[in-house]
Image: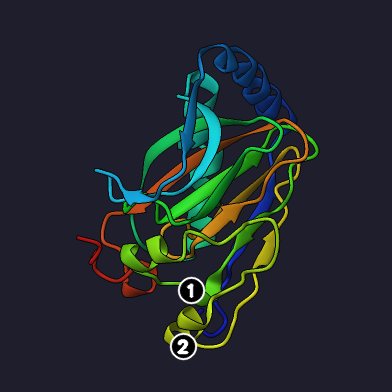
Amino acid sequence: MPLEGERIFFRRRVPDTLFERLCSEASLAEKRTEKIEADTCEVDAAGAVSSRGSCRIAGPRDALNEFHHSFGFELAADFAGLEQDLMPTRASFLFYDCDDYTFFHHDTSLSHITIIVGLSDGLLPLFAYPSFGPISDKDVIQLNYISPSGPLELSQQMQERFGSRSKAIEIAVDKQFAVAIKGRRIPHARPRQPVAGSICTACYAFVLPSKDWLTPRNDAA
């Protein structure tokens, strides 16, 4: 369950010049993308639940690296609201073709905070599930069959295990806005996209995270 008074996300507009550079870099990055498609769910070497879904991905260059270490870093620190050391860990561009999606998952152990920037119009909101945070990798995998095209629907078995049925919180990721979420603690999903679009992400980890940012020990093995 979410903590009392827990802030689920934090949004801020990206300055015009920096945003234009991110868009220009994304246009170049799209030419070197790799398509990721998966119809199974498993834990990868970095401790992330690799969920079912499809998209194209490319690594950062100058503009996204600058965002990761400046504007994004400041946004992550403000979202954290804690006197703890943060470190930038990973960043990437993601491109969604029509009907691409990402199922229920949470991010790697190096992504206590994930920032998502909308680079195009028309992307559907991100679905976040704070009532399932924190959640173990094993339980994420068991819930990974959930369709992200509508409210969270649980089987009777899942209802008995996790309590009453929970619905997602929709988080808009509008063009030129950066949205910070608890990428590791709170599972999330991206519904099937009605149009092609793109985002970039920047992730941050606490050097010594407090218990409020941790997830249960990985028991997926």
Residue lying at the far left of the rendered structure = 221
Between circles 2 and 1, the one closer to the viewer is 2
Residue lying at the far front of the rendered structure = 156
The residue carrying mark 2 is 160
Number of residue marks: 2
Q: 62 or 36: nearer the eye?
A: 36
- Residue 163 at x, y = what percent? 50, 88
- Near mark 2 (Cα within 10 A), the count class, few <14, some 14-19 or many ≥20, is few
Q: Earlier in the sequence, mark 2 or mark 1?
A: 1
- Residue 186 at x, y = what percent? 48, 65
**Residue 122 has which mark?**
none
Report if residue 66 is visible in the image: no
Q: Which residue sits at x=71%, y=52%? A: 125
- Near mark 1 (Cα within 10 A), the count class, few <14, some 14-19 or many ≥20, is some
The residue carrying mark 1 is 132
Q: Is residue 120 left or right of residue 76?
A: right
Residue lying at the far right of the rendered structure = 122
- Residue 204 at x, y = what percent? 40, 48
Q: The C terminus appears in which quarter of the rendering?
A: bottom left
Q: Is residue 85 left or right of residue 52?
A: left
- Residue 72 at x, y = what percent? 53, 42
Q: Which residue sits at x=54%, y=72%? A: 130
Amino acid carrying mark 2 in the image: Glu
